[in-house]
Image: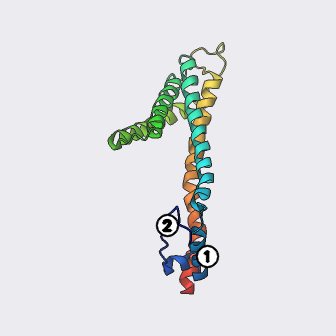
Amino acid sequence: MAQNRWPIRIVKQEPVAKLFGIGREDLLSLEMMLETDTPIHVHRRRPQFAVVGCFQVILFAMHIAQLIIGALNLHDCPRQPFIPIYLLVIGVVTLLFSILQCRRIRWSACSCLVSLFVFCWFIAGNVWIYSVYEPSYNKTASPDMYCNKTLYLFAFWTMNLNYILLGFLLFCPCCSCFFVLPLWMVAYIDD
């Protein structure tokens, strides 16, 4: 028998196995698969890492775009002058927070304070952006009541994207409960 490079000890728990419909034969075949030299657990984590990595790259790019658009249009929205400031601040804070998270710097108190600030700033951004919905984009018609079209629409749609992502994050656990609960009920009824 070959020496296993990945020492994994299988604990056979019948209730958990029955919960997912795994029989004793399946557990034995899983044990035989783990005795090979192929790291099975590595292959299963790659798709998850790819999805999370792509998601982080997209968010990182969005924060950089918020920073740039907020800085370039700092004085281009007299109708609501806080919109470019909102984009600038949220871009800087979330970029710094992301960089600190990537460097594995974990400050629990600081992390909580930054999260609280981002949440409060997000609420303020909602008020500033949605309160002037559909401002005049024509600078010559009303110089005091206009807002740069690129600035406003970018702020508006990034705010909407935040709500879409929040809905998705709340929807996924509900779906997993919807699909796992019938498996649990079948295993419970079989006992």
Q: From this viewpoint, which residue is outermost toward the left?
A: 109
Residue 165 in the image, given as x and y percentages of width and height: 58, 46
The answer to whether one can see residue 21 in this image is no
| Residue drawn at point x = 55 percent, y = 32 percent | 63
156 above or below 50? above
Query: Which residue appears at 43% of the width and 41% of the height?
Result: 104
The CA span between labels 1 and 2 is 14 Å
**Near-viewer residue (65 or 73):** 65
Residue 25: horizontal and vertical position, in percent? 61, 81
Of the image marks 1 and 2, the number of the one nearer the N terminus: 2
Q: Can you tell which mark lies on residue 29?
A: 1
Crowding at dot 1, Cα within 10 Å, few <14 / some 14-19 / many 20+, comes out as: few
Proximity of marks 1 and 2: CB atoms separated by less than 8 Å: no
Identified at 60% across, 25% down, the residue is 151
Provide residue 6's location: percent of width, then percent of height.
Answer: 51, 62
Callout 1 amino acid: Ser
Residue 187: x, y in percent? 56, 80
Pointer 2: what residue? 8
Report the residue at 57% width, 82% height from top: 24
In front of the other: 71 or 123: 71
SS assignment at label 2? loop
